[in-house]
Amino acid sequence: MHPQPASPSLRGVAAGIASIRYISPVPSAPKTLSITQVLACGAAVVTLSMGIRHGFGLWLQPVIQTQGWTRETFAFALAIQNLMWGFSGIFAGMLADRFGAFRVIIAGAILYALGLFGMAHAPTPMLFAATAGVLIGMAQAGTTYAVIYGVIGRNVPASKRSRAMGISAAAGSFGQFLMVPTEGFLIGSFGWQQALVILGIAALLIVPLAWGLREPGFAGGGVIHREQTIVQALREAFKYPSFQLLMAGYFVCGFQVVFIGVHMPSYLKDKGLSPQVASYALALIGLFNVFGTYAAGVLGQNLAKRKILAFIYLARSVAIVAFLLAPLTPMSVYVFSSVMGLLWLSTVPPTNAAVAQIFGVAHLSMLGGFVFFSHQIGSFMGVWLGGYLYDKTGSYDVVWYIAIALGVFAALVNLPVKETAIVRPPKPGSRTGAQSA
């Protein structure tokens, strides 16, 4: 007997299945950059961007002496810078998540150069605030951690992510160690205005480095589509208590480090120590922060990030108390700077890794930008209050006491943070509602 031909209905079903297989292949994993490339280019960008900004405290004395301004005037411009950095970082993160980081980084480098050129030649406090504050703040938003960590999150597996973030943060610390003495040398050799122009040219080196962070998923101007919209991601994050606690802790981080970074050179000068002591102190902070941030990133792979953060904030308060109680000598300054260096940006890897672990990496740059905005509000308060209270009282004592109390507060609010991946309601056709890291 001859086999019966398949009925038209069966032939249609078979053709339909074949058609489905043809137009709907099993999706392959998205292409990613190599870890080496991400870390090399990302670390170099952060080294330049963070290295330049860490030395701004060295300009306080020469600028106010030349222009006849008060410390509050200079401090207010840098306070605007920190606030604008945090505010712009939200939108820089959104753009980087949507269209790719390299475009954002290039724009940030150009703004950095323009801001430094303008800072060198601003004749009035308003223009100084517009250049040193607004332009450089926007530039830092596009060339620092929120954007770079988004690239790391999308291209580095979760098992290596915290360590990779630690390496990137350590690069920023190395930039401080490298650039602060360099900036002191430039000011002494060429004058403070020409030194800023030279740094503006150096900032443009970030442009070619950005091309090394051009992710394949964004090639050709494309965008990556996500299950969550921006509004849904924000609503989820801001309703989650642990996100709020991380933001509160990061506020304290900003207050402490920017107050110390900007005002400690003047504090030491007021106490009779030479400017070289301040330069060495800031360089030591940068050097030891290389080890501190890397160690925090490594420890974050195995230990609870909330406990690491609580320890860092509490240790900062203890270090400040010891510094204020000990006799002030160059050696006590160097010891304090070394200890603070270990704790300086070591909050960055565990904080950002916790955000990625809780919410995933789809909107990591944006969520990291919001957390960092809280950091920068703290930075604004720390740098501005330092100048304001000094002009009112003739001393930095009150601000030191505030920094101590805030450190204890930050240690306490980080302890209840829940680091496990957030559980989302399952969507139609999905197998699970848990968010993978």
Image: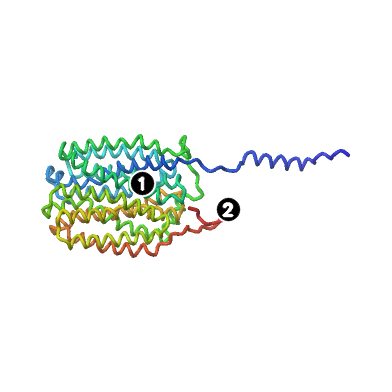
Answer left or right for 320 relative to 351: left
Q: Which amino acid does label 1 sit on?
A: Ser
Q: What residue type is labelled 2?
A: Ser
User: Closer to the observer: label 2 or label 1?
Assistant: 1
Residue 81 image point, x, y percent: 26, 47
| Label 2 with label 1: CB-CB less than 8 Å | no
Q: In this view, does 168 lie above or below 393?
A: above
For this rendering, which residue is in front, 17 or 306? 306
Residue that mark 2 sits on: 430
For this rendering, which residue is in front, 402 or 133? 402
C-alpha separation, residue under disc 2 versus residue under disc 1 = 35 Å
Q: Which residue is drawn at 21% across and 38% down?
A: 196
Report the colour scheme: rainbow
Answer left or right for 318 relative to 239: left
Residue 210 seen in this snapshot: yes
Residue that mark 1 sits on: 168
Kind of element beneath mark 2: loop
Quadrant occupied by the N terminus: top right
Residue 226 image point, x, y percent: 50, 47
Residue 127 seen in this snapshot: no
Residue 335 placement: quadrant: bottom left
Residue 191 placement: quadrant: top left
Q: Which residue is drawn at 34% across and 55% down?
A: 347
Answer left or right for 301 relative to 143: right
Residue 205 image point, x, y percent: 31, 35
Kind of element beneath mark 1: helix
Residue 364 image point, x, y percent: 42, 49
